[in-house]
Amino acid sequence: MSSHILRDSPDHYAGAAAHATARAVAAAYPYLGLGPQVKARIDIAATDALAQALTTAIRHGLGPITVAACEGARDGAPPLILPPAAGPGAVQLVCDPVDGTLNAARGGPRAVSVAAFTQAPSVTTYLDDSQAIFAIGAHSVDVSHALDTSPFPIIAVHLQRPELLTATLHRDDNLALLRALAGPQSRITIGSRTGYRPTLAGPGWVAVGDASIPLPYECDLEFGRIGLVEAQIQSGLYRSWCGLVVSRDRIRSRADGLAGYLHSYLQARDRADVDALRALFTSAELARFDAADTPITEVTETLRQRNFGIGTDAVVAIAALSTPTEPSLTQREPLLHAPCWSSGTNRLDVDTLIRTPAGISRRLESVAVTEPGVLPCPARDWYRDLSWTTVAECEDLAALAEGRNPLPTTAFHEVQR
């Protein structure tokens, strides 16, 4: 198999990615808005549908695919398993069956399914999906060397230009850094509260509560701590990008927060101070680095598009389980619209954004949800009768979904990221 198969037939893989993510959306769609109790079920349904769709595509000639990275394992989501693939020609898959699962469970915006095909270096043996990445990506300015010195000046200058949107994922450490660099804010708007944190917006910036993967198509510059899989995918979607392997727990334990952590990190790296660099990570993280025989000086090198993530030649599909756009925060045209169910044709129309080396396009994927082999059986049965009594689910979920349990428990123990 040619080592350039992805470059030679991007449309072939774009179609497969769009079909697969749309089916993941269709499998998760019945659970929308049922509450945090169904968060795990959304992940399971989407993962199973994504795997089923890609397995079918492989059998019909797509070619061998290796699962390079799949978001969710750290949160207890099932692994995505595809037929074994071997050889240098295998295309790598980096995916998140649902980015923004809690948002979907709570019925809010910002939930998408993402699949990226790549032949670029995308996985390093000393990282797993529990690892955090500090990243900065942009379209109008070159940030590829921002972490060689300090990213703060570039971010601060960008925040002075409210006509260009600056974005971050709303985590306490990211938000504290944004506030420090943006200065006093006269107006902050609160948007959706369905994520791990509420979505906030100020003059020229937004801090989204979840689902950061679509941000490269929503903002001009993004910075902050995100997950490994999100970083791998986003690294290929910005015009310029760079990142650092960081420790969430070490950042959160510092009184000076993310800004102080990054300052210490860059200083220690400049001095090649091995002890100071190791002190920036937990014992569990250091054990993983050491087990992979990776020196800390290598772990802390700047991550760049040429040697990390999906690469700029990747094929990516982003399908909307709920629209990423919040009308209360922006007057812009929605990036993607929410799915639309047609009972007359038994189809779910899923809005999908597709990126290939040739450019960006949108297509409406129409999923025949009741046809055999399209969705896993429970989802297909639900669509056939629109009744939870036809689905092999526990009685509590059926009662909740059909309104027979008017006061379901909504307790939710937040997953720390």
Image: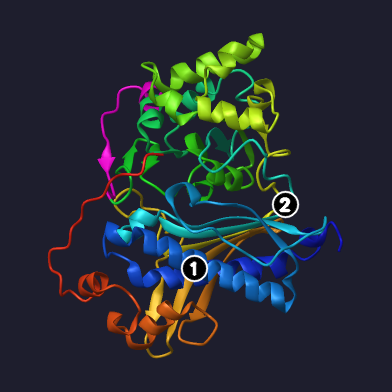
Q: Which mark is residue 186?
A: none
Give the residue type at disc 2.
Asp
What percent of the width, then of the height, locates residue 189? 26, 41
Taking the magenta stretch, the answer to whether it contains residue 284 is: no
Q: Which of 327 and 228 is in front in this view?
A: 228
Q: Earlier in the sequence, mark 1 or mark 2?
A: 1
Give the residue type at disc 1.
Ala
- Looking at the image, residue 52 sits to the left or right of residue 42; the answer is right
Magenta range is: 178-193
Q: Which residue lies furthest to the left in this view?
A: 407
Q: Which of 324 and 392 is in front in this view?
A: 392
Q: Is residue 144 visible?
A: no
Q: Which quarter of the figure has residue 150? A: top right
Q: Nearer the viewer, residue 396 or 259?
A: 396
The quarter of the image holding the N terminus is bottom right
Q: Which mark is residue 313?
A: 2
- Whether 197 is drawn above or below 42: the answer is above
The quarter of the image holding the C terminus is top left
Q: Nearer the viewer, mark 1 or mark 2?
A: 1
Q: Nearer the viewer, residue 377 or 117?
A: 377
Taking the magenta stretch, the answer to whether it contains residue 192 is: yes
Q: Is residue 71 visible?
A: yes
At horizontal 73% and vertical 71% (from top left) the residue drawn is 62
Q: Which quarter of the figure has residue 86? A: bottom right
Q: Residue 24 carries which label?
A: 1
What percent of the width, then of the height, locates residue 386? 32, 83
- Whether 188 is drawn above or below 351: the answer is above
At horizontal 52% and vertical 23% (from top left) the residue drawn is 281
Q: Which residue lies furthest to the bottom in this view?
A: 344
Q: Which residue lies furthest to the right in this view?
A: 2
